[in-house]
Image (cartoon, rainbow, N blue to C red):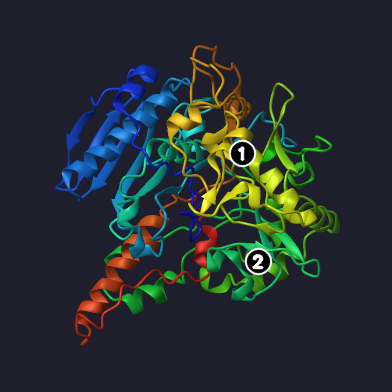
Amino acid sequence: MKTTTVLFSIALAFKTIYSRTIAEALYGITNQLNVSKGDNSSELVESNNFVYKFHCSEEKELCDKIKNNLAYATKTISNTFEIYKPITFEVFVDDLSKYGLTQTLAGVLDINYIPLKESRNSSTPTYVYAQSLAKQLKLNKQNPNYKANDFTMIVNNCNSIPEKKDNELRSIMIHEIFHGLGFASLARLSKLTDSEENDPYSKGSKLDYNEDDQYTITPDIIPSYNKKLLEITNEEEYDKEILNTNMNKFLPFSAFDKNIVSLKTGEKILNNLKFYYKEANKYCLPKNGSPLLLKDASDKYISNCLNKCSAKSKETIAHIAKKYYFDYHTLGILTKEGEKIPLQTLYDEYRPGSSVSHINNPFFDEYFRRVKEGESREDLYDRAKNTFKEDVLLSYYDDNFILYFSDEDDLTVEQMLKVLPNNPKHPLIGNGIVKIMKTMGWTEKGQKRINHTYYIDETIPIANSESFQYLYKKKYELSQLSEKSSNKTEGEKTKKTLNKRNLLKYVPIY
């Protein structure tokens, strides 16, 4: 597809509407939804083990279309995995260009996590599990203090990109929900620099490889917003106050990260960094026990404090960053069956939220090989249509395509079904995807639940992830108020987008 933009990695953008007949044939999906009306623009929808608050102030036809797409996606996932406790989330249908995300069709952010250990032993490392997954596991605590939402999804109404209004969204919805179910890396690559020009998180683009640069892996950290921020009515005051946002503590890597391996050796590459988050907290948090504030968490500050970590950690990080994150076909997930499923890495570049958090598109292996070796790629590309040739793509694709990261996919679902094996249990969701999810702890539909107890690590409190509410919705609302109170004419007024600053580097969007 050709619709990736700021901080987002979007799945396949399909041009042709998937017919109701095919959907019903595969999954028995109908348009029946249990909907409770809220205010004029929100509804509570219960559908196939999922409960979500649906915010949509668009025309009824568009809102209904997106709800039906979500019904298809949730039914697909319900038919693939056992869901013992409902998955809860919020959906916002909006003009994403307001937030600087014009070309984005959909995305997931604000994934909430639960810190879990596989035993009580103090030497057992903690990993964070997506709350949606933790709810399906057997925990030592019966009623944990779960956050209201497992994650948040945003969907573009495409008002600013009308040529995309007829795009097929069902497969994109499936893709995005998978991120909300835990298919996401929290090991973030950064350049050791305080230059915003070279910071992929502030630019929302990519990090290009330079052999003279140093790189670090930064553990995730979730901002803790002061509820009083929502009462502020002045944009300048809001910008000032949000700089006092607490950054709390760096977190362990995710249940997804712990299974990342070198495709060549099978070695778990983050295995020697299981307690790296403790080093980050030791050297980066104030010594008096108070939280790190956003205004103090500059790139230079974080780089300097992480440079105080142990020599072993720094050596491991430097090796991982340069050897695996800037080349193609280097990393994979090691499944419980011992199979290595390749993850997406890119040649000479790293994309936040995209690299490693997707399954490798096998077509990219051939494409990047030719780039690296200086060979022609003309036979792969259709210049008249400004996209890769469909027959070429289909010759490389496999059944894991739903979780590919790609820039050039304009294929219909009907075309994609041609490359899938005959799998009546979970068509459209590849066996590799199912194996990865089972490795993290999900139970495949019809299989016996894993009889293992996970222990909540009470020493790691995790703030409620609410960046969409505070950094996007509230910020845009205030910018609009600021515009209205100015003396500019309507013709002079411009649509303001979020001032990203450093905080967005802590707001992963998939």
Q: For numbered disc 1, what is the local secondary structure?
A: loop
Residue 197 placement, left or right of 328: left
Residue at x 59%, y 35% (from the top left corner):
116
* Pointer 2 or 1: first along the chain: 2
Name the spot of residue 70 as percent of width and height, x first: 34, 35
Q: In this figure, which residue is indicated by the disc labeled 2?
A: 287
Residue at x 30%, y 63% (from the top left corner):
230
Amino acid type, label 2 = Lys
Name the spot of residue 197 as percent of width and height, x first: 60, 75
Check the image and report above or below for 77 versus 447. Answer: below
The one nearer the camera, 403 or 370, is 370
The one nearer the camera, 251 or 34, is 34
The one nearer the camera, 222 or 495, is 495
Residue 321 placement, left or right of 302: right
The residue positioned farthest toward the bottom in the image shown: 487
Residue 102 placement, left or right of 398: left
Q: In this figure, which residue is indicated by the disc labeled 1?
A: 359
Badge nearest the viewer, 2 or 1: 1
C-alpha distance separating marks 2 and 1: 41 Å
The one nearer the camera, 419 or 125, is 419
Q: Quadrant of residue 87?
A: top left
Q: Residues within 10 Å of mark 2 (few under 14, many from 20)?
A: few
**From where the camera sits, is residue 138 visible?**
yes
